[in-house]
Image (spheres, helix red, strand yellow):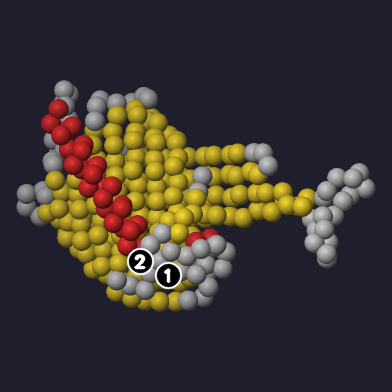
Amino acid sequence: MTALWPVARPSVRLCAFAAVAAAVAILTPVTSAHAFEVPKVLDDGWQSRARLFGERTTGASSTTSLSARLSGQYRQGRFEGRLDTRYLRSTASLDVARTDANGDAVVGADGDVITDEVSRRSRDRRYLLFEPRWYLSGEKMYLFGLLDADRDRPTGVDLSLRQIAGVGYRLWGDKKNFLAAGIGLGEKRLRTTGGTRDDSGIGYFGIKLALQTSERTRIGAELDSDFGGSNDFTEFSLTFGLELTGQVSLSFAFQASVNSEIDAADSASANSLDSRTVIGFEVDLPG
């Protein structure tokens, strides 16, 4: 379920970064206490995962929410490519009493107040990302590019395109426990639902943490942030996974994002934090 709270832009980025830093500090000792074997290198070839979340509530008001995410990664030698696609739609409906010109409720022949259903789409996001990486000697330092397209009209974003190049560093050398961070520079092209268009240079910072805490549980955290342009964007997620079978896991996730300086015609507030807490399933697809 989506909620909106007005927040100061610097606080959002600071809180998200603090959350990742806290997760690293608290959970890093877990990796040295494994009682099971973990592959020491990433496998060549394809690795992919699908996630699906859904929600439906009814009563005085009703809400529906559906989100899906398909991510894939290809690795061959020093080259690694990541593809990420996301879809999210949330709609809220409420029965509102019909009123006349004087503002009085309209009553039908049966004596009951006539109501009309009012629906509002709070999220409608479509996102596509491609990130190629080239690892330098030592398998820790890498060069990367990032191309992504994002659209979420209810939040004021008609289309956002980013092209970024940078350098990153990956700590830990196995596929289930790692910390990777990257910084870069690039360009952002933004078109808002209000008709504003802007091209501007941006700075970029991203960090990703993955920990296999036991044979059946894992924790992940991601932070993606661009800054310096006409519109700053920050996205943060924290996920806990519980393996049910060899390929299916139950996932608990908290996701938050913020766009600054956007006046959406169908958004009640700007500079706001949009957050979701969801439970769903993840499926590891065969390579």
Crowding at label 1, few (<14), some or many (≥20) Cα neighbours within 10 Å?
Answer: some
Q: Would residue 155 appear left or right of 234 to someone viewing this image?
A: right
Residue 16 spot, x, y in % from top left: 31, 52
Tell me the quarter of the picture where residue 241 sits. top left
Residue 207 visible in the displayed image: yes
Residue at x 44%, y 76% (from the top left corner): 197
* Horizontal side, residue 46 vs residue 111: left or right: left
Q: In the rendered structure, which amino acid carries the disc numbered 1?
A: Glu
Quadrant in which residue 248 is drawn:
top left
Instruction: Give the amino acid at mark 2.
Output: Asp
* Residue 16 shown left or right of residue 42 in the figure: right
Residue that numbered label 1 is attached to: 261
- CB-based contact (under 8 Å), mark 1 and mark 2: yes
Residue at 36% x, 63% y: name it: 9
- Outermost residue, left direction? 137
Observer-nearest residue: 279 or 169? 279
Residue 225 is situated, as x and y percent measured from the top left of the image, at: 30, 60
Figure quadrant of the C terminus:
top left
Which x, y percent locates residue 155?
A: 49, 61
Q: Secondary structure at mark 1?
A: loop
Which residue is painted at 64% across and 39% down in the image?
Answer: 58
The tag on residue 139 is: none
Between 237 and 191, which is closer to the camera in this rendering?
237
What residue does disc 2 label? 232
Q: CA distance from mark 1 to mark 2?
A: 8 Å
Q: Is residue 35 above or below residue 92?
A: above
Asked if residue 75 shows in the view, the reply is no
Residue nearer the viewer, 126 or 30: 30
Q: Quadrant of residue 202?
A: bottom left
Q: Earlier in the sequence, mark 1 or mark 2?
A: 2
